[in-house]
Amino acid sequence: MTRAELFEQIKKKHSYLCVGLDTDITKIPKHLLKSKDPVFEFNKQIIDATNEYCVAYKPNLAFYESLGPKGLESLEKTVKYIPKECFTIADAKRGDIGNTSSMYAKTFFEYYGFDSVTVAPYMGKDSVTPFLEFKKKWVILLALTSNEGSRDFQMLVHSRQSNMDSQEPKTASRLFEEVLAKSQGWGTKENMMYVVGATHPGMFTEIRKIVPDHFLLVPGVGAQGGSLEEVSKAGMNSHCGLLVNSSRQIIYVSSGTDFSEAAGKEARKSQQEMKKYLGG
């Protein structure tokens, strides 16, 4: 999916909602356990109930890999079932030396057919660029994540001086800012997004100074306490430029037989708020 196609879906649906399919077999409604494939049946009903209100889906690979081959079969069926107009994200957080990253890229882009994959930047350029070689596919690079431990490394400040002999004063920046700045030489706004957690609302204005035109994937709204209003007002650009993810708040809003209907209502509530911020 291209950037223009994604933006068209945002305009059409008046939404920049991404539904996270973090499907935990111990949390899905008990009546589904009688199904041949409980995980896929849960996902199928969630997708049917929410696709009118969202533009993207994000399966978290850990929830499928933990179930072995059956879980990967559920993942494959889920990706095929997602409507083609919806953007798909493999939340895999991969990133390794070049030839290994190439294999990861083939896995998610060629085998499963995802539109994008989340990638960790710690190993540098050659661990990321193999993912960028695929047309109409996206890297979503981890920049400032929503978890509490994000402050352990991502917020570390260091001084930088481009020329050791220069008399110019050193400039200070945080590690996540270095990731944002440096990686722009690897990809473009047409094939690279960044993960920026909603739990850091005060950072969005600064982040937009570095990456004004890129899409941001924003986890942390809902169960983790992030504010959709704060994120939208500080992070939106002229092409919206946001995909706000909600997982637990939508997919586990009910554990009864009405779980899909309840999920649809919760997704619509988020979509209606987003419509307001989009000026719709």
Image (tube, grey):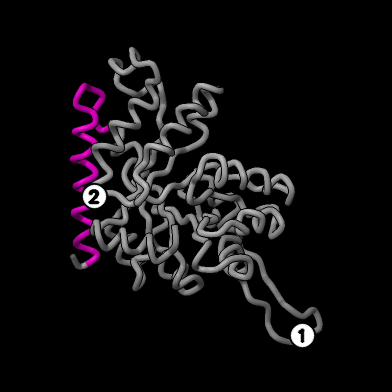
Q: Residue 166, labelled with which disc? A: 1
State the residue at coordinates (27%, 59%).
Answer: 229
Sort mark 1 into few (<14), some (14-19) or many (20+) by Cα contacts within 10 Å. few
Name which quarter of the figure residue 22 lies in: top left
Task: Locate residue 192, reporting x and y percent.
Answer: 53, 61
What quarter of the picture does the N terminus occupy?
bottom left
The answer to whether residue 12 is left or right of residue 192 is left
Name the residue that disc number 2 marks: 270
Residue at x-position 48% and y-position 51%: 115
Residue 199 seen in the figure: no
Q: CA distance from mark 2 to mark 1?
A: 51 Å
Residue 277 painted magenta: yes
- 98 and 119: which is toward the camera: 98
Residues shaded magenta: 252-278
| Magenta residues, dominant SS class | helix
Residue 256 visible within the image? yes
Residue that lies at the very extreme toward the bottom in this rendered image: 167
